[in-house]
Amino acid sequence: MIRKAVIPAAGFGTRFLPASKSQPKEMLPIVDKPTIHYVVEEAVASGITDILMVIGKGKRAIEEYFDRNFELEAELEHKGRSEELQAVRDVTDIADIHFVWQKQLNGLGDAVAHARCHVGDEPFAVLLGDTLVESPKGPVTRQLMELFERYREPIVALEEVEREHVSRYGVISGSQISPGIHLIDDFVEKPAVHESPSRLAIASRYVFTAEIFDYIDKTPRGKNNEVQLTDAMRLMVREHAMYGLHFEGTRYDIGNKLDYLKTNIVYGLKRDDLGGELRAYIENLVATQMR
């Protein structure tokens, strides 16, 4: 049974400068909730309420968001704004959230290593704090957890990307052992199009055993002189079975400006209170532009 999740959220978010200069990219809103709130909701919907966030310089807003704000609550209560008051309180009650600081940005592998003391010898989930995933089969993290119960080995979420885009991702080499499930034999970080072993890319959700920490310790610095999680996984897969789930659904990369805009539109259209008017506006805008 997996009880704990780790959410790395320490990066600078340079692709969103200047907005991310004073605001964590994970706090950029999707309609009216920060991206990282949705990530926490996925963990909770998967049955995990013990969450460790790995944050860095300039990320204190994440701590404050999940903490109580008594002055704001008192003001909302005084004005009789019960709906907003409940929404604010729900944020602080969503899960048991802990924080640890990555004092120097040394890569995703190093960020995950900061969770060693918190998770101990237990298996745990990792959800990247700037990426949303949706599946009609339920939370992707829960799907990974269910597979872990079957195989008792690390599981990663996979998505199929366009061949011309494989150089943007870490992709797997392996074989399909049942529909949607792959036995992985290697990982290739951002391969050239003609050298990519597949179109299946790592999709920001993982379940690891505690042994991953030992492999991170053995991992030399790689790209950008940082400890890369994919490099540690390459070491691990040589000695342990590792599986990938090609999940049914969609991944939204909030660290990408265009995808961020698309995600706001998609989530806005789903809202009962906004969807109708937003759809009408888009349709009118498109019709006007085509004249």
Image (cartoon, helix red, strand yellow):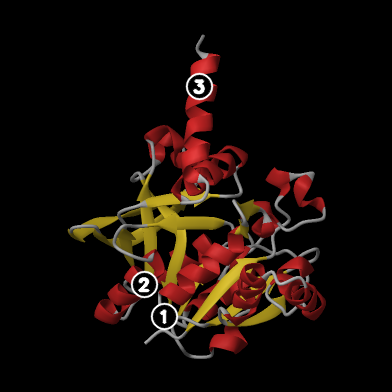
- Under tag 3, what secondary structure? helix
Determine contact: label 3, label 2, CB under 8 Å. Answer: no
Q: Nearer the viewer, residue 285 or 234?
A: 285
Query: Image point 64% across, 54% down: which residue?
Result: 29
Q: Which residue is mark 1?
A: 47
Rendered image quadrant of residue 222: bottom right
- Which of discs 1 and 3 lies nearer the camera? The answer is 3
- Under tag 2, what secondary structure? helix
> How many angstroms separate mark 1 from mark 3 (CA)?
42 Å
Which residue type does callout 2 highlight?
Answer: Arg
Which residue type does callout 3 highlight?
Answer: Val
Instruction: Check residue 142 in the rendering and tell me which mark sits there, or answer none.
Output: 2
Q: Earlier in the sequence, mark 1 or mark 3?
A: 1
Left or right of 231: which side holds 22? Answer: right
Q: Nearer the viewer, residue 287 or 119?
A: 287
Whether residue 200 appears in this view of the structure is: yes
Q: Which residue is mark 3?
A: 286
The quarter in which the N terminus is drawn is: bottom left
Q: Earlier in the sequence, mark 1 or mark 2?
A: 1
Determine contact: label 1, label 2, CB under 8 Å. Answer: yes
Q: Residues within 10 Å of mark 3 (few under 14, many from 20)?
A: few
Q: Which residue ends up furthest to the left in the rendered image?
A: 178
Q: Residues within 10 Å of mark 2 (few under 14, many from 20)?
A: many
Query: Image point 35% across, 44% down: which residue?
Result: 199
Q: Position of residue 194 (x, y in %)?
A: 39, 34
Q: Is residue 26 above or below residue 55?
A: above
Which residue type does callout 1 highlight?
Answer: Gly
Q: Which residue ends up furthest to the front in the rendered image?
A: 80
Q: Is residue 111 above or below residue 176?
A: below
Q: Earlier in the sequence, mark 3 or mark 2?
A: 2
